[in-house]
């Protein structure tokens, strides 16, 4: 059984940095896409960033572009999210997601696997 395990969440001051990590456990072929989403209570899950198996050409939500960096070593089933210049509005539960199919990175319905979520709190 494949599981995505996240780590690295926590409390940080505005302007600070935090790195989230996600790795897949269990035997599985390489995911075509790995991505990060986030969610705050009462709102829909929001795309943060994603990367295809090549590890090149990641895509980001406009709200995090230039501040967040997603990295993946080729087709490894592991991904990191480096978050810099954090803002209070980045506070959310962050979820790692993965899938084998193509299509838009930002569509949560296309993902086969989800992590349990890790809380990121940015104090203002």
Image (cartoon, rainbow, N blue to C red):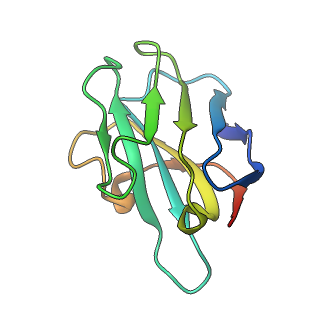
Q: Position of residue 88 (x, y in %)?
A: 60, 66
**Dividing the image into 4 quarters, which one contains the C terminus?**
bottom right
**Dividing the image into 4 quarters, which one contains the N terminus?**
top right
Q: Residue furthest right?
A: 11
**Frontmost residue, 66 versus 7:** 66
Dividing the picture into quarters, in which one does residue 109 lie? bottom left
User: Horizontally, is 121 left or right of 87 in the view?
Assistant: right
**Frontmost residue, 87 versus 71:** 87
Work out whether residue 2 can be spotted. Answer: no
**Number of numbered discs visible in the structure rendering:** 0
* Above or below, comparing residue 7 to residue 90 in the picture: above
Q: Please report the residue visible at 22 percent of the width from the left and 49 percent of the height from the top.
A: 104
User: Horizontally, is 85 left or right of 16 in the view?
Assistant: left
Dividing the picture into quarters, in which one does residue 93 lie? bottom right
Q: Position of residue 78 (x, y in %)?
A: 56, 25
Q: Please report the residue visible at 44 percent of the width from the left and 33 percent of the height from the top.
A: 69
Q: Please report the residue visible at 46 percent of the width from the left and 13 percent of the height from the top.
A: 73
Work out whether residue 52 can be spotted. Answer: yes
Q: Please report the residue visible at 53 percent of the width from the left and 23 percent of the height from the top.
A: 77
* Above or below, comparing residue 24 to residue 13 in the picture: above
């Amino acid at each position: 059984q494949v599981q995505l395990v996240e780590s690295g969440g926590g409390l940080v001051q505005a302007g600070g940095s935090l790195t989230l990590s996600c790795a897949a456990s269990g035997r599985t072929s390489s995911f075509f896409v790995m991505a990060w989403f986030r969610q705050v209570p009462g709102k829909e899950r929001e795309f943060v960033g994603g990367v295809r198996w090549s590890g090149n050409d990641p895509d980001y939500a406009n709200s995090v572009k230039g501040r967040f960096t997603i990295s993946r070593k080729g087709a490894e089933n592991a991904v990191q999210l480096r978050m810099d210049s954090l803002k209070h509005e980045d506070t959310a539960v962050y979820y790692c997601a993965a899938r084998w199919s193509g299509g838009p990175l930002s569509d949560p319905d296309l993902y086969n696997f989800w992590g349990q979520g890790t809380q990121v709190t940015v104090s203002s």
